[in-house]
Image (cartoon, grey):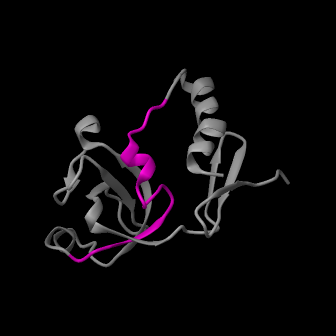
């Protein structure tokens, strides 16, 4: 299952029910980025990542955004209006990075996501498979 399918089948109905949200729109860059939600990534060595103490660290992608719309502060100088949020287990900060500072490691196979009563498991190819209830 592609992430877009996850959102349309699981997240959007949940958001409609719980929050009254009727639609979610994304930019083509968000949908076509080689790095997606849930991927494991490594931070490249740069003056910006060195200063923050994250150069070479591995983390997990928790979000993508268009900074001009969201207003997030981006580490680095984005080539496009696009940023990736990376979470590190040992760091409480919420950091958004220019895409060129983030290097793909893998799709973090075996990771899970639960939305309402739907649980999904990530595969090596990056798909999300719905886990059957126990």
Q: Quadrant of residue 125?
A: bottom right
Q: Nearer the viewer, residue 84 or 86?
A: 84
Q: Indicate yes or no whether the magenta region holds residue 33.
A: yes
Q: Is residue 17 above or below residue 8?
A: above
Q: Is residue 9 above or below residue 64?
A: above
Q: Residue at x 58, y 40 (%)?
A: 7
Q: Residue at x 37, y 60 (%)?
A: 86
Q: Is residue 72 above or below residue 91?
A: above
- Residue 74, horizontal then vertical, whole percent: 22, 52
In the image, the segment drawn in magenta is: 24-45
Q: Is residue 67 above or below residue 94?
A: above
Query: Does residue 45 appear to the left or right of 122 in the view shown?
Result: left
Total labels drawn? 0
Query: Does residue 14 appear to the left or right of 85 in the view shown?
Result: right
- Residue 85, horizontal then vertical, whole percent: 36, 55
Q: Residue at x 51, y 59 (%)?
A: 38
- Residue 16, horizontal then vertical, whole percent: 59, 25
Q: Indicate yes or no whether the magenta region holds residue 131.
A: no
Q: Quadrant of residue 69?
A: top left
- Residue 102, horizontal then vertical, whole percent: 32, 67
Q: Residue at x 30, y 52 (%)?
A: 83
Q: Quadrant of residue 112?
A: bottom right
Q: Nearer the viewer, residue 76 or 93?
A: 76
Residue closest to the far right: 134
Which quarter of the image is occupied by the C terminus? bottom right
């Amino acid at each position: 299952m592609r992430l877009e399918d996850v959102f349309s089948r699981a997240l959007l109905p949940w958001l409609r029910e719980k929050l009254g949200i009727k639609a979610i729109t994304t930019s083509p860059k968000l949908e076509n980025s080689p790095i997606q939600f849930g991927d494991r990534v490594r931070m490249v060595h740069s003056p910006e990542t060195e200063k923050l103490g994250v150069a070479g660290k591995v983390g997990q992608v928790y979000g993508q955004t268009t900074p001009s719309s969201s207003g997030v502060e981006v580490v680095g100088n984005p080539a496009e209006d696009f940023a990736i949020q990376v979470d590190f287990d040992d760091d409480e900060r919420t950091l958004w990075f220019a895409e060129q500072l983030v290097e793909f490691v893998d799709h973090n196979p075996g990771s899970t996501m639960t939305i309402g009563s739907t649980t999904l498991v990530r595969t090596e190819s990056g798909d999300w498979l719905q886990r059957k209830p126990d």
